[in-house]
Each structure stands twice: as C-alpha cells, then as structure tokens.
Image (spheres, helix red, strand yellow):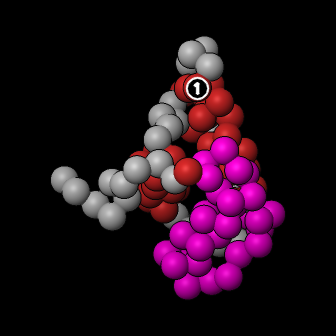
Amino acid sequence: MTTSSDRPVPDHVGDPGAVETDLLRFLGKRTGRIWTADADVFGSGGLSSLFAMELVVHLERTYGIAVRGSDLRMDNFRTARRMAALVGRLRGAAGDGAGA
C-alpha cells in the first residue's frame, strides 16, 4: 500500500527543532487544533488509542525508525517535544549500529 507517508526520510531529521515543527504541523492537520511543543496531546482529551497508533506509524514512515518494545510507552508520545526526542534517539541508535 502506498501512502503519503511513504517518502524519503527528511534531511533535517537530526534537528530536533525541525522534527518538532513537522510534528506540530502533523498534529494540527490531523486534529484541527494548534499545539505547542510541550502540550500533552492525550491529556487534553479527545484523542484515542487509535490516534496513538497512527502517531507511531507516522513517526516510523516519516523518519525511517522502528518504534518497538519499551519505546512504545505513552510517555514518548505525549508531546511533540518528546516525540522529537524519541526520533532523535532512535535515529542515533540506528546510525551507530547499536540498535534500539
């Protein structure tokens, strides 16, 4: 299946600020709300566990990472800042050959 997320990993993936900006744009588009980097997207209500899985798929496809095991904790997905940190950590682990 081909989706709009099946695209090359963005060049700026190593820049947490740019990843945050991309994630805030994605969240805004999907929810119709304006978010800040530290806003708790699940604590505000109205977002489902299905949306959490959509976030995981978006991160994996957009940033070329695999979110597995202990990284699937809700705390990693509460804010755009935490998601950007997760992306950076997983990209770093993939780049150094150490694995996740």
Q: Where in the figure is residue 80, as x and y percent of width and height? A: 69, 60
Q: What span is in magenta?
A: 12-41
Front-lying residue, 75 or 81:
81
Q: Is residue 100 visible?
A: no
Q: Can residue 26 be found in the magenta stretch? A: yes
Q: Is residue 64 placed above or below 2 in the rendered structure?
A: above
Front-lying residue, 46 or 72:
72
* Amino acid type at image mark 1: Gly
Q: Is residue 70 placed above or below 33 in the rendered structure?
A: above
Residue at 55 percent of width and 85 percent of height: 32
Q: Where in the figure is residue 97, as x and y percent of width and height? A: 57, 16
Q: Where in the figure is residue 69, as x and y percent of width and height? A: 54, 27
Q: Where in the figure is residue 57, as x and y percent of width and height? A: 43, 50
Question: Which quadrant, please, contains the C terminus?
Answer: top right
Residue at 66 percent of width and 44 percent of height: 14
Residue at 62 percent of width and 43 percent of height: 87
Query: What secondary structure do most residues of the magenta stretch adopt?
Result: helix
Front-lying residue, 71 or 89:
89
User: Mark 1 — residue?
Assistant: 95
Residue at 62 percent of width and 52 percent of height: 12
Q: Can residue 20 be found in the magenta stretch? A: yes
